[in-house]
Amino acid sequence: MNNSVNGLSRDVTITNAFGLHARAAAKIAKLVQNVKSKVWLIKAGEKADASSIIDILTLACEKGSKITLKIDDQSDLEILNKLADLVESGFGE
């Protein structure tokens, strides 16, 4: 986990055989809907708002893709960890 003045981030790998598809994106968006700050998914410099299914899908993350999860407010650390667990578990599929 990386700690900075601008929040916290964590690097994860997409393990789901189908990558980060619509159903998985919906799980992410639902998980972050009540956070105090913005949550971002970043892949190769492209940034997506984790509360937007469409935004997430624009990253086109296939299995094996490396992404960074970032939160702007350190008080949302629990959400960052839950989000990382969700991604690393293959979205429970």
Image (cartoon, helix red, strand yellow):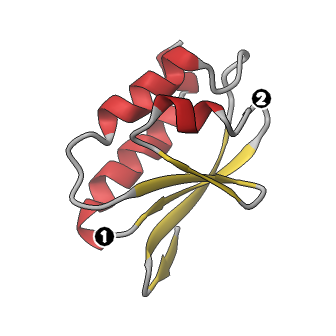
Q: Pointer 1: what residue?
A: 73
- Per the image, label 2 sits on a secondary structure element best described as loop
Question: Where in the figure is residue 89, as x and y percent of width and height?
Answer: 53, 28
Foreground of the two, 11 or 54? 54
Q: Pointer 2: what residue?
A: 62
Tell me, yes or no, if residue 88 can be seen here: no
Say above or below: 60 vs 70. Answer: above
Q: Quadrant of the C terminus?
A: top right
Question: Where in the figure is residue 68, as x and y percent of width and height?
Answer: 61, 56
Q: CA distance from mark 2 to mark 1?
A: 28 Å
Q: Is residue 22 left or right of residue 31?
A: right
Amino acid at circle 2:
Glu
Question: Where in the figure is residue 19, as x and y percent of width and height?
Answer: 70, 24
Question: Where in the figure is residue 38, as x and y percent of width and height?
Answer: 36, 58
Q: Residue at x 43, y 23 (%)?
A: 26
Q: Residue at x 30, y 70 (%)?
A: 73
Residues at marks 2 and 1 touching, judged by CB atoms closer than 8 Å: no
Amino acid at circle 1:
Asp
Q: Residue at x 27, y 60 (%)?
A: 76
